[in-house]
């Protein structure tokens, strides 16, 4: 069997979309070499935008400095974390979970307002850690805001955040991931 190791520059929810695109290429009859080439081209375009209740887990995992976690904890702020191209950045802080989730949706909407980016060329999913009911409600909110159905609305596809990632984000992580469809890159 042929094996090619690809650093996807993705994690969790966007990684699941990356694998989904690989499966779609297989099902569409792409050759091994064509699929590897397409996957390499997809790598920099995946995104994850999520929130969690605190930065404690990211700090304990060595992802953020302790001072940032201490300040946000004392002020009861919820962070927005963005991962693109393998890099993690903070997209802001909000006083309530509801506002933080609304900001995740706003970031998602802004991405699709950029020139040359067509929402129909992307697969989008919700990723969550432990609360399936919250994820279902968030999924509906995202679909309403972006005026399109998420991947899991059309195929059997749900993304729970994996245990290794959850060690860094904590059990309350929830957000959205997007990846260009393989035939639109």
Image (cartoon, rainbow, N blue to C red):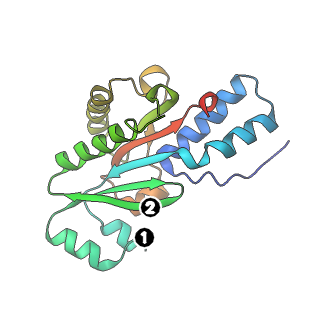
Q: Mark 2, mark 1: which one is toward the viewer?
A: 2
Q: Which residue is mark 2?
A: 88
Task: Judge whether 59 appears above or below 126 on screen.
Answer: below
Badge 2 local density, few (<14 within 10 Å), some, or many (20+)?
few
In the displayed structure, does residue 84 sit left or right of residue 5? left
Label 2 – label 1 distance at C-alpha: 9 Å
The answer to whether the residue labelled 2 contacts the one labelled 1, judged by CB atoms less than 8 Å apart, is yes
Query: Residue 63, which numbered label?
Result: 1
Q: Earlier in the sequence, mark 2 or mark 1?
A: 1
Residue 116 in picture, x, y percent from top left: 48, 34
For the N terminus, the quadrant is: top right
Report x, y in % for residue 94. 19, 56
Query: Residue 30: x, y in percent?
Result: 76, 28
In the image as oriented, which residue stretches furthest toward the front? 115
Quadrant containing the C terminus is top right
Q: Quadrant of residue 28?
A: top right
Give x and y (percent) for residue 49: 38, 48
């Amino acid at each position: 069997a042929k094996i090619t190791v690809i650093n996807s520059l993705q994690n969790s929810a966007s990684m699941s979309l990356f694998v989904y695109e690989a499966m779609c290429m297989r099902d569409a009859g792409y050759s091994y070499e064509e699929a590897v080439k397409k996957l390499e081209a997809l790598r920099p375009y995946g995104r994850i935008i999520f929130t969690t209740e605190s930065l404690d887990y990211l700090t304990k995992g060595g992802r953020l400095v302790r001072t940032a976690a201490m300040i946000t904890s004392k002020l009861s702020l919820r962070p927005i974390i963005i991962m693109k191209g393998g890099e993690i950045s903070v997209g802001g802080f909000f006083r309530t979970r509801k506002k933080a989730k609304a900001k995740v949706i706003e970031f998602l909407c802004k991405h699709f307002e950029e020139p040359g980016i067509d929402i129909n060329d992307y697969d989008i999913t919700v990723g969550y850690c432990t609360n399936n009911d919250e994820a279902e409600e968030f999924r509906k909110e995202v679909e309403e805001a972006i005026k399109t159905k998420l991947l899991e609305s059309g195929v059997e596809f749900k993304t729970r955040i994996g245990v290794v990632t959850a060690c860094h984000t904590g059990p309350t992580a929830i957000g959205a991931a997007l990846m260009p469809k393989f035939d639109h890159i």
